[in-house]
Image: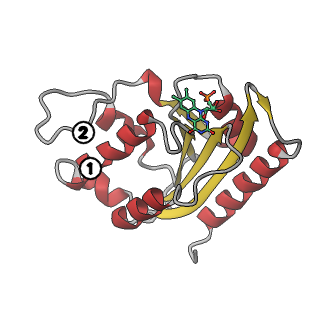
Amino acid sequence: MASGLPVVLLASSRPRGNTFALARLAFAEDQVRLIDLGRHRIAYYDYDPAGDDDFIALVRTIIEAPLWILATPLYWYTMSAQAKTFIDRLGDLLDRHRDLGHALRGKGFAVVCSGTDAQLLSGFDEPFALTCNYLGMRYLGSHYGRFTGDAFALPDTAADAAAFGRQVEADCRSDTR
Ligand SMILES: Cc1cc2nc3c(=O)[nH]c(=O)nc-3n(C[C@H](O)[C@H](O)[C@H](O)COP(=O)(O)O)c2cc1C
């Protein structure tokens, strides 16, 4: 297993909004490194990239982490555009930066998602699971936290999020899953 702290990749338009709060409930501040994708220049995937943005440099700083946790709000029933752009750019690691692509193998990947709907659509996890499978990463599942405005909708949201965080970290440590 790779060394280093797990990384939370915050993919929200609000750096201190519901998604951030949910990620913090699931993963204690001193146990993960939080990276706000909004503070980095990450262009859309380009078949013929013209110039450099921050993506590859960012990946180099997180490639040793054993676990990546994507923290996204639910936007129109799916992940945010920031989250999707980050995932699209993993395509760069399959050709131009294969050394980094190889380093993804065996890494854990999980998702925390905040929204106002009662639950996620049934197919929410599928793109993450299939992408992880393609890249050789281990998909460890998602956790949905429901909010009403800026307050938690459910009294057990905090406990549920913390339980998910513990489970994901344990699953990541275990090589059998
Ligand atoms: C463009 C947009 C689309 C949204 N679509 C959904 C949706 O499909 N389902 C849902 O439950 N909430 C939806 N929401 C609400 C957000 O998911 C919710 O408020 C979330 O907790 C916001 O997280 P944040 O504070 O990190 O931005 C949407 C919000 C925005 C701005």
Q: Is residue 6 above or below residue 85?
A: below
Residue 121 visible in image: yes
**Mark 2, residue position:** 45
| Residue at image mark 1 | 91
Q: Are marks 2 and 1 in contact (CB under 8 Å)?
A: yes
Q: CA distance from mark 2 to mark 1?
A: 8 Å
Quarter holding residue 27: top right
- What residue lies at 62% left-to-right and 46% top-to-bottom? 112
- In this view, the residue in front, 56 or 38, is 38
Task: Residue at 38%, 35% (x, y): give it.
Answer: 58
Q: Earlier in the sequence, mark 2 or mark 1?
A: 2
**Ligand 1 visible in quadrant:** top right
User: Does residue 36 appear left or right of residue 99 in this picture?
Assistant: right
Q: Position of residue 68 (x, y in %)?
A: 51, 49
Mark 2: amino acid: Tyr
Q: Is residue 39 left or right of residue 157?
A: left
